[in-house]
Image (cartoon, rainbow, N blue to C red):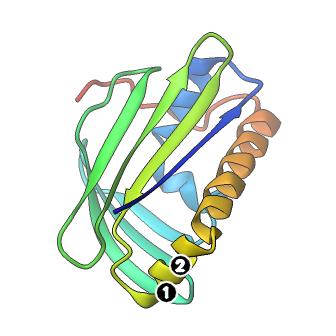
Amino acid sequence: MSQVRESIRVDVPVRTAYNQWTQFETFPLFIDGVKRIEQVDETLTRWVAKMGGVEREFDAEITEQIPDERVPWVTVGRETEHSGVVTFDPTHTEVTLRLDFDSAGMAESIAGKFGFIDRQVTGDLQRFKKFIEERGTESGAWRGEV
């Protein structure tokens, strides 16, 4: 199992950053390789992503959700195995993304070894920063707890 952990400060209130992050269907606007996300219910999302030329479809279950603090998840099913957590530091609106993934396929293994996944996560957080700072407000919010 490999792990990537990246952080970025965003120039919006933590509530705004958190609220936008809960709008999973907007992820294709700033997360490279994500083609579509469908919010099935409060805790289940269905993803279509293309990474390293390989398209994958998988479900992810949100295992906990604490407004303005954290959203951890784990994939459901066998094809793609990963988990992670995004946390929000309210003192200076820092967003930290930790991703744990199994390098099961050759493409994922090579990407992990050469730092492509680290760079992708860094780029995704930079695009999130630009997205939310340019908007200045969230496109929606889900403030419930899981």
Location of residue 37 with respect to 26 vertically, above or below: below
Specify few, some or many for label 2: CA neighbours under 10 Å numbering under 14, 14-19, or 20 or more.
some
The one nearer the camera, 28 or 2, is 2
| Dot 1 and dot 2 residues touching (CB under 8 Å) | yes
Q: Name the mark on residue 95.
A: none
Location of residue 111 with respect to 39 vertically, above or below: below
Q: Residue at x 71, y 56 (%)?
A: 123
Q: Residue at x 44, y 21 (%)?
A: 69
Q: CA distance from mark 1 to mark 2?
A: 8 Å
Q: Amino acid at mark 1?
A: Ala
Q: Residue furthest left?
A: 77
Location of residue 30 with respect to 5 vertically, above or below: below
Left or right: 102 in relation to 51:
left
The one nearer the camera, 30 or 26, is 30
Q: Name the mark on residue 107.
A: 1
Q: Amino acid at mark 2?
A: Met
Left or right: 36 in relation to 83:
right
Q: Nearer the viewer, mark 1 or mark 2?
A: 1
Q: Give the quadrant of the C terminus.
A: top left
Helix or strand or loop: what does disc 1 sit on? helix
Q: Residue furthest right?
A: 134
Mark positioned earlier in the residue sequence (1 or 2)? 2
Q: Residue at x 55, y 35 (%)?
A: 96
Give the x, y percent position of residue 7: 63, 37
Q: Residue at x 38, y 75 (%)?
A: 103
- Say which residue label 2 marks: 51
Give the x, y percent position of residue 98: 47, 45
